[in-house]
Amino acid sequence: MQSTLKILLISDDEVIHNQILNALTGSYAVQLIRTRDIVREINRDVQDIVIFVQPESDIAVESIQYIKTTNPSTLVIFIANETDFTLLRSITKAGATEFFVYPDEHSLFISRVPTIFQNYENNKLKQSESIHSFAKGRGQIFSVFSGSGGSGKSCLAATLAQTIKVETTAEVILIDLNLQFGGIETLLSIQSNRSIADLAPVINELNEGHIRNVSQKLDSSKLEILISPCDAEAAESITDEFIAKLLRTCRRSFDFVIVDLPSYINGQVVTSLEESDRIFYVLTPDTPALKVLKQFEEISIRLGIELSSRTSIILNKVGKDNEIQAKDLKDTLMFPIAAPIRLDYKGLQPYVNKGEPVRKMKKERRLIPFAKDVKKWGISLLE
């Protein structure tokens, strides 16, 4: 039975990482990345164990410090290509727990791995906390995306964020990355001159205070919202690096970050998808939407976006008169269906027309079918 530990192997040395992968495959699921991808991957997901093979450049100490600062509980194993006690001292001080020299200690490393991993797993079980206890420093990023316009993703993203906020004590922020035209501000009747674009002057020193100064807070649920500038010119000035820094800062400051993405692919969207812990693709049950989903899968492969372990389908506008039923999609979709959301025109449209939040408090007397389905989806994410 394969271990559930998240193990990240960082290596530019093909010979060494092939030996390690061959030794561990079957017992452990190991993800391989290059040293240039350290920051992106460490910010994207919490790793239980990092095996770091000594790179050619002198960035090992700085990289390990970054890993431990971002995720203090991560166990770092360093693989050196020569015996160097000065390096050992620096690496240990930076936060590495184990140190091996390749190829001399390959056999020792392989023999020690089961014990090291088992001890880590035992300690992790002892320190585990309730799912409703939220700790600062490692929030989750959920991106809601669809290649099809009119799929209802903005309404879903807004209602999911409201649901998580009212159902828990978590700090939640909703980010509208439809930079050219927006949408969230209309759905929630937000009128403000402040938007994501106002963070540009402080992006290099961005912190929680800056974000809260620009974000809007709903009176009903106290949900924080970063609205779009709704300006094509301003959208051009927001770079991929800006998006990465914004999401990483929000991850450190909030328990849940819900991102509403536009219905197209560009550098900003790719960056958001790569930074996300979970990607929810909103699919309406019809043939054109399925064709667009297939195109999204193909372009993601070409761009090198890893989807398989993080992507789920939200089947929206489900009804008995649909061209395609959920049962017809089981053998067609590459990704699992996380939640079906019923078509609820009569219940939902008055909220959209008035610009009112669908969820305002935890114990509401009557929830419309749409809100009930989103609540079920949101609760499943907390579990």
Image (cartoon, rainbow, N blue to C red):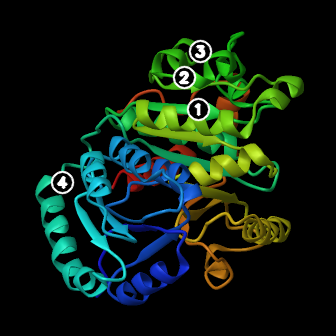
SS for callout 2: loop
Q: Which mark is residue 206?
A: 2
Q: Quadrant of residue 69?
A: top left
For the point 14% across and 53% down, which residue is it? Answer: 127
In the depicted view, which residue is nearer to us: 24 or 53? 53
Q: Which mark is residue 128?
A: 4
Please identify the quadrant where the N terminus is shown.
bottom left
Whichever of labels 1 and 2 marks the residue nearer the N terminus, that label is: 2
Amino acid beneath label 4: Ser
Marking on residue 246: 1
Vertical position of residue 126 compared to residue 30: above or below = above
The Cα–Cα distance between marks 2 and 4, rounded to whole angstroms, is 31 Å
Number of the front mark, 2 or 4: 2
The residue lying toward the viewer, choosing from 22 and 144, is: 22
Residue at position x 50%, y 71% from top? 32
User: Spatial distance from mark 1 to mark 2, Cα to Cα?
Assistant: 7 Å
The location of residue 27, given as percent across then percent down, is 32, 86
Distance from disc 3 to disc 1, alpha carbons, whole Å, reads 12 Å
Query: Disc 3 residue type?
Result: Val
At 18% from the left edge and 65% from the top edge, which residue is drawn? Answer: 120
Amino acid, disc 2: Leu
Using the rendered image of the protein, determine whether residue 218 is visible from the camera's viewpoint. Answer: no
